[in-house]
Image (tube, helix red, strand yellow):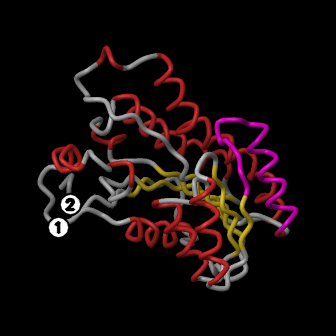
Amino acid sequence: MDMKNKVVLVTGGGTGIGKATCKRFAERGAKIVLNYNRSEQEAVLTGKELKDNGAEVLLLQADVSCDDEVREMVKKAADHFGGVHFLINNASITKQIELSDLEAVTDDIWRNLLDVNVKGMFYCARAVAPVMKQQKMGSILNMGSIAGITGSGSSLPYAVSKAAVHGLTKSLAHALAPEIRVNCIAPAAVSTRWWKGEEEKMKRLSGHLPLQRISSPEDIADLICAIAAQDSMTGQIISPNNGMVI
Protein backbone atom coordinates (compact mmCIF):
# COMPACT_ATOMS: atom_id res chain seq x y z
CA MET A 1 0.00 0.00 0.00
CA ASP A 2 1.35 3.38 -1.00
CA MET A 3 1.59 5.68 2.03
CA LYS A 4 1.87 8.99 0.20
CA ASN A 5 -0.86 11.37 1.40
CA LYS A 6 -2.39 8.62 3.53
CA VAL A 7 -3.34 9.50 7.12
CA VAL A 8 -1.73 7.65 10.02
CA LEU A 9 -2.86 7.97 13.64
CA VAL A 10 -0.11 7.03 16.09
CA THR A 11 -1.09 6.79 19.75
CA GLY A 12 1.68 7.67 22.17
CA GLY A 13 3.42 9.30 19.24
CA GLY A 14 5.59 11.82 21.07
CA THR A 15 8.31 9.54 22.42
CA GLY A 16 10.19 6.29 21.85
CA ILE A 17 8.76 3.87 19.31
CA GLY A 18 5.80 6.17 18.64
CA LYS A 19 8.08 9.08 17.72
CA ALA A 20 10.23 6.89 15.47
CA THR A 21 7.08 5.55 13.80
CA CYS A 22 5.73 9.04 13.10
CA LYS A 23 9.06 9.94 11.49
CA ARG A 24 9.15 6.81 9.32
CA PHE A 25 5.59 7.33 8.05
CA ALA A 26 6.31 11.01 7.39
CA GLU A 27 9.38 10.04 5.35
CA ARG A 28 7.04 7.96 3.19
CA GLY A 29 4.75 10.93 2.56
CA ALA A 30 2.01 10.17 5.08
CA LYS A 31 0.05 12.77 7.02
CA ILE A 32 0.55 12.34 10.75
CA VAL A 33 -1.98 12.47 13.58
CA LEU A 34 0.18 12.41 16.69
CA ASN A 35 -1.69 11.44 19.83
CA TYR A 36 -0.36 12.02 23.32
CA ASN A 37 -1.78 11.98 26.81
CA ARG A 38 0.66 13.28 29.44
CA SER A 39 3.78 13.81 27.32
CA GLU A 40 2.69 17.14 25.87
CA GLN A 41 6.13 18.74 25.82
CA GLU A 42 7.69 15.78 24.00
CA ALA A 43 4.76 15.62 21.58
CA VAL A 44 5.07 19.30 20.71
CA LEU A 45 8.80 18.90 20.06
CA THR A 46 8.22 15.81 17.90
CA GLY A 47 5.49 17.61 15.98
CA LYS A 48 7.77 20.57 15.34
CA GLU A 49 10.54 18.27 14.11
CA LEU A 50 8.14 16.56 11.71
CA LYS A 51 6.78 19.87 10.41
CA ASP A 52 10.28 21.26 9.96
CA ASN A 53 10.94 18.28 7.69
CA GLY A 54 7.86 19.03 5.59
CA ALA A 55 5.25 16.73 7.12
CA GLU A 56 1.60 17.62 7.72
CA VAL A 57 0.98 17.00 11.42
CA LEU A 58 -2.02 17.24 13.74
CA LEU A 59 -1.40 16.91 17.49
CA LEU A 60 -4.32 15.56 19.52
CA GLN A 61 -4.42 14.94 23.25
CA ALA A 62 -6.51 11.99 24.41
CA ASP A 63 -6.40 9.31 27.08
CA VAL A 64 -6.83 6.08 25.12
CA SER A 65 -8.39 4.39 28.16
CA CYS A 66 -11.34 6.83 27.90
CA ASP A 67 -13.74 5.82 25.13
CA ASP A 68 -15.30 9.28 24.76
CA GLU A 69 -11.89 10.92 24.34
CA VAL A 70 -10.86 8.33 21.76
CA ARG A 71 -14.01 8.82 19.70
CA GLU A 72 -13.54 12.61 19.75
CA MET A 73 -9.88 12.21 18.73
CA VAL A 74 -10.75 10.04 15.74
CA LYS A 75 -13.53 12.44 14.69
CA LYS A 76 -11.13 15.39 14.78
CA ALA A 77 -8.52 13.46 12.81
CA ALA A 78 -10.99 12.37 10.12
CA ASP A 79 -12.53 15.84 9.88
CA HIS A 80 -9.12 17.49 9.59
CA PHE A 81 -7.51 15.18 7.04
CA GLY A 82 -10.56 13.58 5.44
CA GLY A 83 -9.97 10.05 6.73
CA VAL A 84 -7.71 7.68 8.66
CA HIS A 85 -5.91 4.95 6.74
CA PHE A 86 -3.50 3.58 9.36
CA LEU A 87 -3.90 3.22 13.11
CA ILE A 88 -0.78 2.42 15.11
CA ASN A 89 -1.96 1.35 18.57
CA ASN A 90 1.30 2.16 20.29
CA ALA A 91 0.25 3.79 23.57
CA SER A 92 1.07 1.45 26.45
CA ILE A 93 2.18 1.63 30.05
CA THR A 94 4.04 -0.69 32.40
CA LYS A 95 5.05 -1.06 36.02
CA GLN A 96 8.45 -2.42 36.98
CA ILE A 97 7.79 -5.29 39.40
CA GLU A 98 9.84 -8.44 39.85
CA LEU A 99 7.84 -11.34 38.44
CA SER A 100 8.03 -13.32 41.69
CA ASP A 101 6.69 -10.46 43.82
CA LEU A 102 2.99 -11.30 43.58
CA GLU A 103 2.07 -9.24 46.64
CA ALA A 104 3.26 -6.06 44.92
CA VAL A 105 0.60 -6.44 42.23
CA THR A 106 -2.33 -4.31 43.36
CA ASP A 107 -5.82 -3.91 41.93
CA ASP A 108 -4.89 -0.42 40.76
CA ILE A 109 -1.93 -1.78 38.79
CA TRP A 110 -4.12 -4.41 37.14
CA ARG A 111 -6.77 -1.82 36.34
CA ASN A 112 -4.37 0.77 34.91
CA LEU A 113 -2.43 -1.65 32.70
CA LEU A 114 -5.49 -3.42 31.32
CA ASP A 115 -7.35 -0.13 30.77
CA VAL A 116 -4.55 1.39 28.68
CA ASN A 117 -2.87 -1.62 27.09
CA VAL A 118 -5.95 -3.66 26.17
CA LYS A 119 -9.14 -1.62 26.39
CA GLY A 120 -7.36 1.44 24.97
CA MET A 121 -6.36 -0.46 21.83
CA PHE A 122 -9.89 -1.82 21.47
CA TYR A 123 -11.41 1.66 21.86
CA CYS A 124 -9.10 3.08 19.18
CA ALA A 125 -9.79 0.23 16.77
CA ARG A 126 -13.55 0.51 17.32
CA ALA A 127 -13.48 4.26 16.75
CA VAL A 128 -11.55 4.12 13.46
CA ALA A 129 -13.40 1.09 12.06
CA PRO A 130 -16.37 3.02 10.58
CA VAL A 131 -14.01 5.53 8.94
CA MET A 132 -11.85 2.79 7.43
CA LYS A 133 -14.86 0.75 6.30
CA GLN A 134 -16.29 3.81 4.56
CA GLN A 135 -12.93 4.18 2.77
CA LYS A 136 -13.10 0.41 2.02
CA MET A 137 -9.54 0.03 3.30
CA GLY A 138 -7.51 0.41 6.43
CA SER A 139 -4.68 -1.10 8.45
CA ILE A 140 -4.39 -1.39 12.23
CA LEU A 141 -1.21 -2.40 13.99
CA ASN A 142 -1.22 -3.20 17.70
CA MET A 143 1.85 -3.00 19.91
CA GLY A 144 2.27 -6.34 21.65
CA SER A 145 5.38 -7.63 23.39
CA ILE A 146 7.61 -10.65 23.71
CA ALA A 147 6.34 -10.64 27.31
CA GLY A 148 2.95 -11.71 26.00
CA ILE A 149 4.60 -14.76 24.39
CA THR A 150 7.08 -15.80 27.09
CA GLY A 151 5.12 -14.64 30.16
CA SER A 152 8.18 -12.80 31.47
CA GLY A 153 8.84 -9.08 31.33
CA SER A 154 8.76 -5.84 33.29
CA SER A 155 5.90 -7.18 35.43
CA LEU A 156 3.32 -9.95 35.52
CA PRO A 157 0.33 -7.68 34.76
CA TYR A 158 2.22 -6.21 31.80
CA ALA A 159 2.93 -9.66 30.35
CA VAL A 160 -0.72 -10.66 30.79
CA SER A 161 -1.94 -7.43 29.20
CA LYS A 162 0.23 -7.99 26.14
CA ALA A 163 -0.93 -11.59 25.78
CA ALA A 164 -4.43 -10.12 25.70
CA VAL A 165 -3.35 -7.69 22.96
CA HIS A 166 -2.21 -10.66 20.86
CA GLY A 167 -5.63 -12.26 21.28
CA LEU A 168 -7.37 -8.96 20.57
CA THR A 169 -5.42 -8.71 17.31
CA LYS A 170 -6.70 -12.05 16.05
CA SER A 171 -10.29 -11.34 17.08
CA LEU A 172 -10.27 -7.89 15.45
CA ALA A 173 -8.75 -9.38 12.29
CA HIS A 174 -11.80 -11.64 12.03
CA ALA A 175 -14.26 -8.94 13.03
CA LEU A 176 -13.03 -6.20 10.67
CA ALA A 177 -12.17 -8.18 7.53
CA PRO A 178 -12.16 -7.80 4.61
CA GLU A 179 -11.80 -4.01 4.50
CA ILE A 180 -9.48 -3.65 7.48
CA ARG A 181 -6.33 -5.62 8.24
CA VAL A 182 -5.19 -6.00 11.85
CA ASN A 183 -1.71 -7.15 12.84
CA CYS A 184 0.57 -6.99 15.85
CA ILE A 185 4.26 -6.80 16.59
CA ALA A 186 5.70 -8.31 19.76
CA PRO A 187 9.17 -6.83 20.29
CA ALA A 188 11.67 -8.01 22.84
CA ALA A 189 13.52 -5.30 24.77
CA VAL A 190 13.76 -1.96 22.97
CA SER A 191 16.12 0.79 24.09
CA THR A 192 13.58 3.39 25.28
CA ARG A 193 13.04 5.48 28.42
CA TRP A 194 10.97 2.62 29.90
CA TRP A 195 14.19 0.86 30.81
CA LYS A 196 16.06 3.90 32.15
CA GLY A 197 17.65 2.77 35.40
CA GLU A 198 16.60 -0.81 34.70
CA GLU A 199 19.24 -1.69 32.11
CA GLU A 200 20.55 -4.69 34.06
CA LYS A 201 17.03 -6.11 34.38
CA MET A 202 16.52 -5.60 30.65
CA LYS A 203 19.70 -7.51 29.85
CA ARG A 204 18.81 -10.29 32.29
CA LEU A 205 15.32 -10.73 30.83
CA SER A 206 16.68 -10.68 27.28
CA GLY A 207 18.97 -13.64 27.96
CA HIS A 208 21.23 -14.88 25.17
CA LEU A 209 20.67 -12.90 21.98
CA PRO A 210 22.25 -14.48 18.89
CA LEU A 211 22.38 -11.07 17.20
CA GLN A 212 24.06 -9.56 20.28
CA ARG A 213 22.07 -6.33 20.15
CA ILE A 214 19.03 -4.59 21.66
CA SER A 215 16.52 -3.20 19.18
CA SER A 216 16.25 0.55 18.66
CA PRO A 217 12.94 2.42 18.27
CA GLU A 218 13.89 2.90 14.60
CA ASP A 219 14.19 -0.87 14.12
CA ILE A 220 10.65 -1.33 15.35
CA ALA A 221 9.30 1.64 13.37
CA ASP A 222 10.70 0.19 10.14
CA LEU A 223 8.88 -3.09 10.80
CA ILE A 224 5.66 -1.31 11.72
CA CYS A 225 5.65 0.51 8.38
CA ALA A 226 6.39 -2.68 6.46
CA ILE A 227 3.63 -4.69 8.13
CA ALA A 228 1.09 -1.86 7.98
CA ALA A 229 1.59 -1.60 4.22
CA GLN A 230 1.46 -5.37 3.52
CA ASP A 231 -1.88 -5.95 1.80
CA SER A 232 -1.80 -9.75 2.17
CA MET A 233 -1.29 -9.90 5.96
CA THR A 234 -3.85 -9.91 8.77
CA GLY A 235 -4.18 -11.48 12.20
CA GLN A 236 -0.43 -12.00 12.54
CA ILE A 237 1.84 -11.48 15.56
CA ILE A 238 5.40 -10.79 14.43
CA SER A 239 8.20 -10.72 17.01
CA PRO A 240 11.41 -8.76 16.34
CA ASN A 241 13.55 -10.13 19.15
CA ASN A 242 17.13 -10.48 17.87
CA GLY A 243 16.85 -14.26 18.12
CA MET A 244 15.76 -14.32 21.76
CA VAL A 245 13.28 -17.18 21.31
CA ILE A 246 15.14 -19.35 18.81
State whether residue 18 is above or below residue 62: below
Quadrant (top left/top right/bottom left/bottom right) for the N terminus: bottom right
Which kind of residue does numbered mark 1 sit on?
A: Leu
Q: Kindly indicate whether the residue at mark 2 contacts the one at mark 1 (C-beta within 8 angstroms).
A: yes
Pick the front one: 173 or 60: 60
**Residue 119: image x %, image y %?**
61, 35
The answer to which image quadrant residue 98 occupies is top left
Residue 211 image label: 1
Q: Which residue is mark 2?
A: 243
Residue 174 covered by magenta stretch: no
Q: Write the residue at 43% across / 38% down.
A: 94
> Mark 1: few, some, or many residues within 10 Å (few <14, many ≥20)?
few
**Residue 229: image x %, image y %?**
57, 72
The answer to which image quadrant residue 241 occupies is bottom left
> Mark 2: few, some, or many residues within 10 Å (few <14, many ≥20)?
some
Quadrant (top left/top right/bottom left/bottom right) for the C terminus: bottom left
Residue 64 covered by magenta stretch: yes
State whether residue 62 is above or below residue 21: above
Q: Which stretch appears magenta? A: 60-80
Residue 121 image label: none
CA distance for labels 1 and 2: 6 Å
**Residue 205: image x %, image y %?**
20, 44
